[in-house]
Amino acid sequence: MSKRTKKPTTAGADLRRTMYRYRFTSPAVALLLFACLSLAACSRGAKAPPADDSGAKGAKSLSNETSEKKVLISGMKFQPATLTVNVGDTVEFTNSDLYPHTATAKAVGDLPAFDSGILASGASWRLVEKTKGTYDYICTLHPNMKGKLVVQ
């Protein structure tokens, strides 16, 4: 029968070093996790208000003339990077990344600005653009993420 003997190990010292090394990052990681979960909880079910139907009752519906396009936010990229739509089309931005993102274009000349606000993972936002032009947009949280929306 083998007898276990307690060998002097450095496991305790390793554990103390590991705890010391991460003592400053632990609250930061916890705070980041809390912020992400809070954003996700706040944005669940958040939808953009419905588009204004300014046409008279009984007029021909525009739904036959417009379509819905999608922009997927994944892998820290807008996919597709360039999307061409017609005036009145709905563009849905969906964040399938693990991180929160935005889709934000600044007003340039006659082109109005748009801003999705912070989209938590799994959240979507819809845009109906009514002004022709080319909109360069970014994620304000990750400015290296760039996209282009061309409205004809």
Image (cartoon, grey):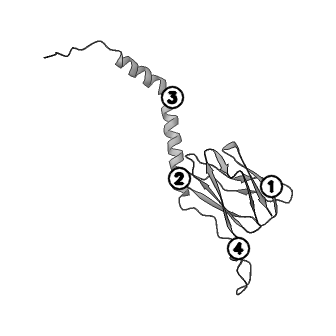
Circle 2 residue: 40
| C-alpha distance separating marks 3 and 1 | 41 Å
Residue type beneath disc 3: Phe
Of circles 3 and 1, the one toward us is 1
Residue type beneath disc 4: Asp
Q: Are marks 4 and 2 in contact (CB under 8 Å)?
A: no
Residue type beneath disc 1: Ala
Of circles 3 and 4, the one toward us is 4
Secondary structure, mark 3, is loop
Q: Residue furthest bottom?
A: 58
Determine the image quadrant of residue 15.
Answer: top left
Q: Residue at x 63, y 44 (%)?
A: 76
Secondary structure, mark 1, is loop
Mark closer to the chain start, 2 or 1: 2
Circle 3 residue: 24
Circle 4 residue: 52
Image position, residue 70 (x, y; %): 65, 59
Mark closer to the chain start, 2 or 3: 3
| C-alpha distance separating marks 4 and 1 | 21 Å
Q: Residue at x 65, y 70 (%)?
A: 50
Residue 120 - label = none
| C-alpha distance separating marks 4 and 2 | 28 Å
| C-alpha distance separating marks 2 and 1 | 28 Å
Of the pair 130 and 37, the residue shown nearer to us: 130
Image position, residue 31 (x, y; %): 51, 40
Of the pair 151 and 10, the residue shown nearer to us: 151
Residue 107 - label = 1
Image position, residue 129 (x, y; %): 75, 64
Residue type beneath disc 2: Ala
Q: Residues within 10 Å of mark 1 (few under 14, many from 20)?
A: few
